[in-house]
Image (cartoon, grey):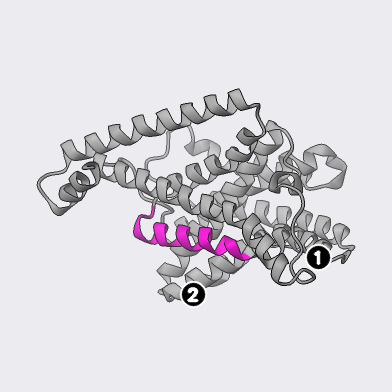
Amino acid sequence: MLGELTGLLFLATVVSLAGAAVKAASLYGARWEISELIKVAQVLASYMVGAWLTWLVLRQPAPHGAWPWWRPLRGPAAGVLAVAISCLSMPVAGSLNQKVGPALFACAVAWLAVEICRSHGLHLGSRAPYTPLQQFQRWNVAEANLIACAATGLLFGPLGALLSQIAPDAAPILQESQTAALGLDGPVNLALGIVRTVAIEDVVVVAATITLMTAVRRPTWEIYTLVCLIEVGLHAYFGLSAIAAVIMAAGRVWLYLRCPSLLPLMASHALWNIFPEIGQLPLPYQLMAGVAIAASYAYISNRLRKSALEYTPDTPARSALVTEKSP
C-alpha cells in the first residue's frame, strides 16, 4: 500500500516539484536548463497514470451507489481520459499542452487516487447522505481551511520581506504575483489552474496520503511531515518564504484527520485561489464581490447552524452549538 502511495505521489507531483525548483533556482540567479527533461517526465507520467487508472477501473466493479448510467461508462471514460492526457502531454499539442493538459492530468491522478483507495476497501472522505449536524461540521471544516489558506497566502509576502532583510543574498523575494509566476493569466487559465491545484493537493497529497498511511498505521507525525514537505516543495517558487506553506499543509492534515470530508477542503481552497483575481477587478466590482461573498457566507452559515440545532438532541454537541451561536 505504501508502495502504491509512493508511486501515486511521485507521478502526481514530480513535474510540479521540478518546475517549482527551477523557478526557485532562478531567484538565486541559477539557470537550470531542464525544460526538455520536465517535458519528457510529463509525457511518461501521463502514460503511466493513464495505464494505471484504466487497469484499476477495468479490474474493479463500480462503487456502491454509483449512478446506473455511469456503471457501463467507467471503463471507456478511463480509456478516453488516458488517451487525452497522453496526447495533451505532447509538446506538439501547443497551448492545450500548457493549459488543458495539466488540468486533465490532475483529474486523472485524483481519480487514480480514489481507485487505489477503493482497491484496498478504503474511501476518500465521508459518505453521503449527511445529517444536518454533519453538514454543519463540514461547513466548519471549510471555514477553518479557508483561514489556513489565508494565513499562508498572507504570510508569503511579509515572511519573504523579513527574510530578505535578515539575509538579502540568501532570501530573494518573488517579485511577481503567484498567478503570474504560474502563468495563470485570465479567468480561463485561472479556472484550469484551480482544478489542477485542488485535484492534486487536496485529493492526492492530503486525502489519499492520510487515508493510505492511516490504513497501514503509520504515526501521525509521519503524515504531517510528508504532507508539509510536499506542500513546501510545490510552493518553492516563493523562495525561502515557501516554508509558510507548512501552516496550510498542517492545518489541512489536522482538519482531515478529525473530519475526513474532502469537498469542504476542495471548495475552500478553490475559493481562496479566486481571491487574487477578484483583487484585480475595479474597486466597485471588488466591493460587489465582497458583499456577495459575505452575504452568502452569513446566509449559509446561519441556515446550517439552525438546521443542526433543530436536529441535534440535548447533548454536549448541541450545547457547543448554542454556545457558538450566543454572542
Image-based side of 37 in relation to 187, left or right:
right
CA neighbours of label 2 inside 10 A, class few (<14), some (14 to 19), many (20+)? few
State how far apart marks 1 and 2 are (Cα). Answer: 28 Å
The amino acid marked with disc number 2 is: Glu
Image-based side of 87 in relation to 190, left or right:
right
Q: Is residue 56 above or below residue 142?
A: below
* Near-viewer residue (234 or 114): 234
CA neighbours of label 1 inside 10 A, class few (<14), some (14 to 19), many (20+)? some
Q: Position of residue 86 (x, y in %)?
A: 75, 47
Residue 4: give its label.
Answer: none
The amino acid marked with disc number 1 is: Ala
**Residue at 52%, 49% in the rendered image:** 150
* Near-viewer residue (43 or 65): 43
Bounds of the magenta span? Answer: 243-260
**Residue at 73%, 54% in the rendered image:** 47
Residue 222: give its label.
Answer: 2
Image-based side of 201 in relation to 184, left or right:
left
**Residue at 72%, 39% in the rendered image:** 100
The answer to whether marks 1 and 2 mark residues whose Cβ atoms lie closer than 8 Å is no
Marks counted in the figure total 2
For disc 1, the marked residue is 25
Q: Position of residue 271 (x, y in %)?
A: 53, 40
Q: Position of residue 201 (x, y in %)?
A: 57, 54
Q: Is residue 99 above or below residue 10?
A: above
Q: Position of residue 98 (x, y in %)?
A: 78, 43
Secondary structure under the numbered disc 1 in the rendered image: helix
Most distant residue in the left direction: 314
Q: Is residue 55 above or below residue 310?
A: below
Based on the picture, tell me whether residue 140 belongs to the magenta stretch: no
Task: Determine the image quadrant of residue 185.
Answer: top right
Based on the picture, tell me whether residue 257 belongs to the magenta stretch: yes
Say if residue 121 shows up in the picture: no
